[in-house]
Amino acid sequence: MNLKRKLTSLLIILLCCLGHSQSIDNSELKDFLKKHVSNEGFIKYEKLVKNKESLNEIVVGLSKITPNNSWTKPETKAYWINVYNFNMLKLVSDYYPLKSIKYIQAPFNIEFININGQKVSLDDIENIMIEEMGDPRMYFALNNTSMSSPKLSREPYSAETLELQLESAAKNFINDSSKNYFSKTTNEAILSPIFKWHASDFEDLNSFINKYLEDKQITNDTNISYSSFDWTLSKELY
Amino acid sequence: MKFKITTLLLLVGLSSFSQSIIKGKIIGADGMPLTGVNVYLNDTFITTSDFTGEFRTEYNGSYPIDVSFSYIEYKELTKTLFDYKDGRNLLVQMIKEKTTDLTQVVVAASRTTEKKIETPVTIETLSKESILNGTSPNFYDELVNVKEVQLNSNNLVSKTINTRGFAQGTNTRFLQLADGAEFTIPVFNSSIGNSLGVNQLDVENIEILPGASSALYGANAFNGIMFINSISPFEKTGVSAYYTRGYTNQEAAGLNAFNDLGLRWAAKLGGQTAIKLNLSYINGTDWTANDTSSKNIVDIGLPSIQYFDAVNIYGDEITGNTVIGPVSRTGYNDADLNDGKIENFNGDISFHIKPTDDSEIKLQQKVSYGSTNFSGTNTRATLKNFLVLQSSLAYTTKNFTLRTYYTTDNAGDSYDMVRTAINLNKKAKTNNQWFQDFDNALEEIRNDNPTFDNNTLITMAREFADYNDVDGYSGNLPTSVGGVARFEPGTDEFDAAFNEVSTSNDLTNGSRFQDKSYTLQSDVNYNFRDLINFAEIQLGGTFKEYGLNSKGTVFNDANDKITYNVYGVYGQVQKKLLNERLKLTGSVRYDKLSELEGSFSPRVSVNYALGKKKTRNLRASFQTGFRNPTSSDLYNGANYGFISLVGSAKDNLENYSQIINFSNPLLGPNPQTVDLTGNYIYDSSFSVGSVQRFANSFNPASNPQDAIDLLEIKKVEAVKAEKVESFELGYRAGIGKFTFDLNAYYNKYTDFIYTKKVVTPYFIDSSIAPEYGGIGAAILSQQFLTHQVYTNAEVPIETIGLGFGIERKFRKFFINGSYNYTKLLDYNETIDPDFVPEFNTPEHAAKFTFGSERLFNNFGFNTNIRWNSEYEWISPFATGTISEAVVLDAQISYTIPAIKSTIKASANNLFGEEYIQVIGSGSIGQTYFLSLIYNP
């Protein structure tokens, strides 16, 4: 299936599917995340590998739910974020131990995610949903297990709390000095490459950042550079 | 699984070999750049980060490649770069390592930051957490549970610590520094506990170097040195506070409450300036000192009712020659001469300015004010309204330190208890009057009652001499030759006389200390690490001026203030070899005190790390240390009536003078005058031993010359620096979940400084016939004075020691134990028979700690148990045996995170047996307390 066709069909799923609104029960997801993500947002990979079965069940469960146009925007956004994050966990759990997902060939292009009978990749989900939803904050909700990636939330995303969750994801990411550096003494900033990769999604990058940045504002004069992305597996060092 | 698993090989195959730049910025958790981080590519050292935290290197090898970052105190970090893009602009955030015995970083051992496990000499630490979990009422007392440390406590305020032998009531051989500045009290040449130190809430960490460190820290770091570092106001702002309420319980003093409260406040005033304020106040009751055993080991065989000098009875030092031989005057108990109350206020305020990220200017004023009893080396004193002030200015950068500080004390209403008792007695009756009354009463009662035994007669004569009456005796008594009855404690007369004596500066009838001595010190240190790469080189120097001003009450400065100075310069080279496994350090220091000869003290040390992660470390060091004589050794001039202390600085020997008028028929009918100058005392005195032997064997009727020949006049050499040569081997390792430390050392001391007593006759005339005493004639006529002189031992002495410590944290518990063996080796006692080493250290000491910071919910507990073997305590003031002791302390604590507070209930000495740490101070009973600590 070529990319264009795939995107189109996903789009159909996203926007046109008819069906009954299904109540989404996140409790299993919630339990799973609590058990496998530390307070500081580190994934407990060994445990994850041990509990692959229940992870599979969750992923299968997510495949069975299909968004349809009776869903609200928040419901749809929350669903896709969860699909992405849980499938990412599934991918890494199949290969672990490994020092980086880069050791998996083209991890974001593997079509292993079953959505309504179609196989899609992580990239497909990321591109399509954010483009369609027009909400760049969602980038900060997606975790790809790398050091430079936004942290994985211990709470699954849900429609009711989505707004708060996305706000805090953006805020946490921007203020995480391991990902975005704002000098305290000079007008210099080193931003995450996520902002560069998705530059077109941020209409006004400065004001987007300033909205979330604490204790500091950037301006047009700020000397901005972008860091390189650290693909090292994010693991608690203790 | 249908994914294609790619191998590393495949990726390597895809990677390019083109030249690329790997660069980035390294920051800490707070987002501040980290300077000097080592950067490695595939384990090969490449470069270090500059002052903006940035690094850059060219690379033209294959990908993927590992780039690692290592920085002391931080966790090592490795990143894998999969292609050149991944290394174009790295943002590297490093986080601090969790502190364990293996990862902890110390500064003191080599004046540079290094891992505790890799230090070339033994180092002990006490962390903020251990203080919080401690069982003791304050952090200073908690030092008793640290390996190697011997705490010698008088009470809640007054105490000293020591390591590796030769402890003293005022420990002039152990140096204490707060943020790099000595908190030595000028008049004592030593610290008293934590007075002028660091507020408990402001302690960041404590490092202790047992053994000599003169090569790095100068002359006074002879037995050891302790560094207390405070928390920067840039790092912790806000308010912290504690309040401790407790009770001390002792058989003699009963149950007494104490209160201890403290506050720390720090605030940043903008990004570059900060202010910090610390306050603490403690009040309580001293352990009553009521040791009535003999002050000296030698028993001359007389009944104690006649002649006895008890440790804690003062005034009985005065003896007179009576019809039955030497008799001691009746003394006063220690408890009668002080109110037993202790009180101490400590405060400091500091302003901090950071002109740049890595430099700081600090201006600080410290104050300590209080009252406590105090067992000095020479006497027991009550420090009352004693004030110490320290002003300091420090400028530090990453590589440079300049610090200058002025410390001064004011003795306030302090007084000497021994002198108080002597002068109280003299106020009632002069010594002549008292001994005459004693003689008269004894003879009259003996004549009237030939059947009375000796002890009854002495008791009655003493009572008469004291009170001009003998209770219940209806026989005839003589008329007193003069004076009034002894002042009985508890009466108004006693209080009036006591106040008069203790507030008078005149040594002949008063006992007040007057002192306004000061020290002015400047230290400078520069580390050339950013200028010189092949090794880490440091140079530094120190200058200290002493100004003694006691109006003759401590030093021989009644007429003129005394000033003298000490300076020192040092250098150190440290080189790491063999992939940083081998560390060689060499240092040398030169110090000189005013007119004394200067001394060099070198140190060489080697450390070798074993194991993949360098978790096992061997260390070996050789160093020489030396210690200059103290102000007291040099300029003492205190006269106690029964003894005068005469320091041996060249100018002191010239300036010291005591004019005595006397007459002796052997010298003709005319009154005589002699000037006992310092030089005369040092050149022409008899040793105490020889006088005793002469007095015991002299018989005018039978070979008197034989006894006279026993008298020895030996010139006492003026005191000079003492020296130690020290060899030490150590091993520190993390094996499994345990960390061990093992060390063994050998110390050889030469020219050990000590005090001895000599007998200075008013005249020595070899023309006097042997039957009249010959050159000892003045002794027979009681025409002599005893002096305490300061000199060096002629015989070298050696000590050996062994230390073992083990530590483990498992689940919620921490456990550690230690054992120290410290032994003074036998030496040839005939070379310098007057020399008695004041070793004052138990041969065996063991400590054990078991606790949990958080046992369940927010409850924690801790227990400490300590044991020491019996040992002798020898000091010019008093000598005695310190018994074996086992002490158990325990605490339970409850933390309430919501209000950032911890409540702690603790009991010290749960076994209840009272024990002594310093002969002359009260025995230590139990302490119970409840502490509330906010935001520690």
Image (cartoon, coloured by chain):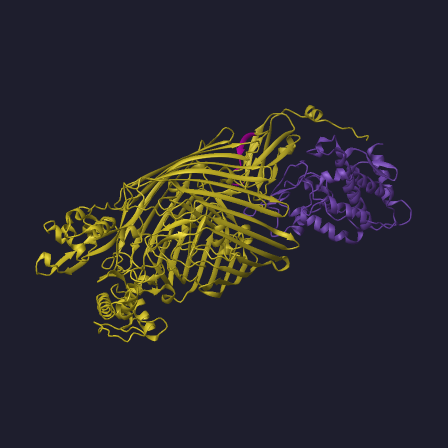
Chain colours: A purple, B yellow
**Residue B433's image quarter?**
bottom left
Q: Is A32 situated left or right of B418 in this image? A: right
Q: How many marks?
A: 0
**Residue B622's image quarter?**
top left
Residue B76 is situated, as x and y percent measured from the top left of the image, at: 58, 37
Q: Is B525 situated left or right of B934 in this image? A: left
Residue B744 is situated, as x and y percent measured from the top left of the image, at: 45, 37
Of residues A135 and B162, which is closer to you in this image?
B162
Of residues B735 and B53, which is closer to you in this image?
B735
Q: Is residue B47 magenta?
A: yes
Q: Residue furthest left?
A: B669
Residue B73 is situated, as x and y percent measured from the top left of the image, at: 54, 41
Judge whether residue B86 can be spotted in this image.
Answer: yes
Q: Is residue A136 magenta?
A: no
Of residues B613 and A23, which is closer to you in this image?
B613
Judge whether residue A77 can be spotted in this image.
Answer: no
Q: Is B190 situated left or right of B284 in this image? A: left
Q: Which residues are magenta?
A: B44-52
- Quadrant for the C terminus of chain A, please: top right
Q: Is A208 situated left or right of B167 in this image? A: right
- Quadrant for the N terminus of chain A, please: top right
Of residues B411 and B425, which is closer to you in this image?
B425
Q: Residue furthest front?
A: B451
Residue B609 is situated, as x and y percent measured from the top left of the image, at: 51, 32
